[in-house]
Image (cartoon, grey):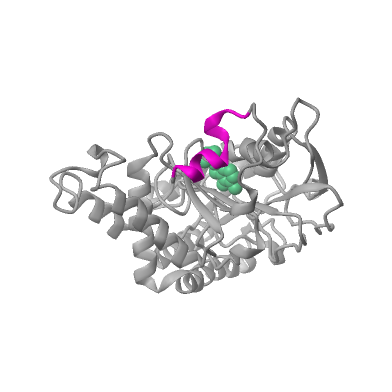
Amino acid sequence: MRVYNFSPGPSVLPLPVLEKAAAEMTNANGTGQSVMEMSHRSKDYKPIIDKTESLLRELMGIPANYKVLFLQGGASLQFAMVPLNLAAGNAPGQGKKAAYIDTGVWSDKAIKEGKKYANVEVRASSKDKAYTYIPDAPPPLAGDAYYHITQNNTIVGTKWDKIPDTGSVPLITDISSSILSEPFDVSKFGILYAGAQKNLGPAGVTVVIIREDLIGHAPDWTPIMLRYDTHSTEGSMYNTPPCYSIYMIGLVLEWIKNLGGVDAIAKINREKAGMFYDYLDASKMFYSPVEKQFRSLMNIPFVIRETDEAKKTELETRFVKEAAAAGLVNLAGHRLVGGMRASIYNAMPVDGVNALISFMKKFEN
Ligand SMILES: *Cc1c(COP(=O)(O)O)cnc(C)c1O
């Protein structure tokens, strides 16, 4: 029996995608091979990576002057690659200035890593209220090499409701947990990056969408694998790419296209999140700690209204355990923030959200 999996990542994949992958496991496209067994440079594999890229371009409306790269190292490696390629100097301490907005754990990690290569300045933060809102983004300053935001904050459940206008300073964004959840105007950004394992496919591949003029500025000492120009020149085939994960992304993109594209999936996502927030806002027992304007469509943390900490922890532990027994799994909040969290990515069906709400009503009673 399949469960409803509310994991923040790696997370639920669409059942038709898994079934198609299973059917093709030992013999893909009549090649007599599994995609896992194919040479990445073979004529059998080429159409797979090409299809994945062209579907992503079509679904996200990626302009022609942007490259799509399939890299490894997770979104976490982009925390280093962005400053290395856009702001690093010839020696440590000589990096250019870079603006960051601190909206939670992942932006904080990007900031810490960025400081090794760039002259990082944190221009706004929502740390004062446990990251439950998105702060106002000040305009960039002269000399900023780039401006970094985390579009959707997976752990605290916030998202930027409007994208800041940074003028000619390239806006860089981490969309690991929100890629393809709703339309993005790619042309507003210099780089968008996402680890695949939240909303795109299995772990092991990171999608980087980068404007061409931002490629080729890494200092000479940059490791070859960490240079955007290496991967863009070689079509993500400087070395062996994560072939199977790229194939799986292709299947997920096909599934989205069949549903009607990003607008259609965004409509379903707004419906799912809307139902869940409506329930939380009306509940006597549970609530969302996030300010309404900034609530994520993908990751919804919630807590139990109880002032006695010990009793609260006991109730929350019981909730997560009983939910799992009812086939609603991975609802514990992030270890750093506690409480509960339902991640309702593209692949989570409306029925899964309904089942969770029904369970919560029963638990509340
Ligand atoms: C999960 C996540 C990351 C880390 O991704 P890895 O691929 O594990 O490195 C970074 N940023 C955000 C917003 C995430 O949700």
Name the spot of residue 240 as percent of width and height, x first.
Answer: 38, 35
Q: Is residue 219 visible?
A: yes
User: Is 227 included in the stretch rendered in magenta?
Assistant: yes
How many labels, in total? 0
Q: Is residue 276 left or right of residue 255?
A: right
Residue 240 shown in magenta: no
Q: Position of residue 86 (x, y in %)?
A: 69, 42
Query: Which quadrant of the picture is home to ligand 1?
Result: top right
- Residue name at image x 56 percent, y 70 percent: 274
Q: Residue at x 65, y 58 (%)?
A: 189
Label the magenta part by its dominant secondary structure.
helix
Relative to 284, 101 lies left or right: right
At x 24%, y 40%, the residue is 38
In this rendered view, identify the residue nearer to me: 334 or 357.
334
- Residue with the most extreme right position: 142
Left or right: residue 254 versus residue 172 is left
Choose between 317 and 266: the one closer to the eye: 266
Q: 301 or 18: nearer the eye?
A: 18
Residue 11, horizontal then vertical, whole percent: 43, 48
Q: Nearer the viewer, residue 16 or 43?
A: 43
Identify the residue at horizontal 62%, vertical 64% (top origin).
Answer: 187
The vertical placement of 313 against 59, above or below, is: above
Task: Identify the magenta region.
Answer: 222-234
Is residue 347 shown to the viewer in this render?
Answer: no
Q: Quadrant of residue 242?
A: top left
Counting from the top left corner in percent of width and height, residue 155 is at 61, 47
Left or right: 271 as drawn, with respect to 86: left
